[in-house]
Image (cartoon, rainbow, N blue to C red):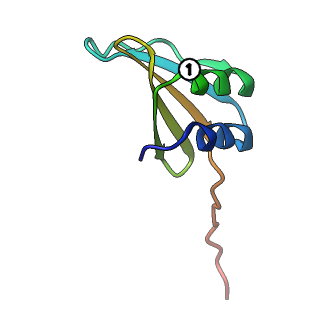
């Protein structure tokens, strides 16, 4: 789903762990090696983008940023707040 820059920045700021970015060419689909970035750098990339698509993958969130570089899409991944329940044996 498409979200605003403000929503994307808030998600990055509230992420409980490391932030990772990778990019891929929209024509060849060749990906770059993921690298860890700071929350400040992530928010800066969001500011430069034209459109932002968010995907919730239970354990991590994915922001796909378009419009930073021609034919390149930048993906920012971060842990999401998920509640994991543990099944226990009860008598």
Q: Nearer the viewer, residue 5 or 26?
A: 5
Q: Residue 72, image x and y in percent?
A: 39, 15
Confirm whether residue 13 shows in the render.
yes
With 63 as the anchor, is 80 left or right in this view?
right
Q: Quadrant of residue 25?
A: top left
Residue name at image x 51 percent, y 24 percent:
49
Q: Nearer the viewer, residue 87 or 46?
A: 46
Q: Residue 56, image x and y in percent?
A: 49, 48
With 30 as the anchor, is 21 left or right in this view?
right
Residue 52 versus residue 81 in the image, above or below = above
Residue lying furthest bottom in this view?
91
Residue name at image x 61 percent, y 71 percent:
87
Confirm whether residue 16 shows in the render.
no
Residue name at image x 64 percent, y 78 percent:
89
Q: Residue 67, image x and y in percent?
A: 43, 20
Residue 69 versus residue 60 in the image, above or below = above
User: Which residue, given by chain and number where applicable, does mark 1 sit on?
Assistant: 48
Residue name at image x 65 percent, y 21 percent:
44
Residue lying furthest left in this view?
27
Q: Quadrant of the C terminus?
A: bottom right
Residue 86 versus residue 26 in the image, above or below = below
Marks counted in the figure total: 1
Q: Nearer the viewer, residue 17 or 38?
A: 38
């Amino acid at each position: 789903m498409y979200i605003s820059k403000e929503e994307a920045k808030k998600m990055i700021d509230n992420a409980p762990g490391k932030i990772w970015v990778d990019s891929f060419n929209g024509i060849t689909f060749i990906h770059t090696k993921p690298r860890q970035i700071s929350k400040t750098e992530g928010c800066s990339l969001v500011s430069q983008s034209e459109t932002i698509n968010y995907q919730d993958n239970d354990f991590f969130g994915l922001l796909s940023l378009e419009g930073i570089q021609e034919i390149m899409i930048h993906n920012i991944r971060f842990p999401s707040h998920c509640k994991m329940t543990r099944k226990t044996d009860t008598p």
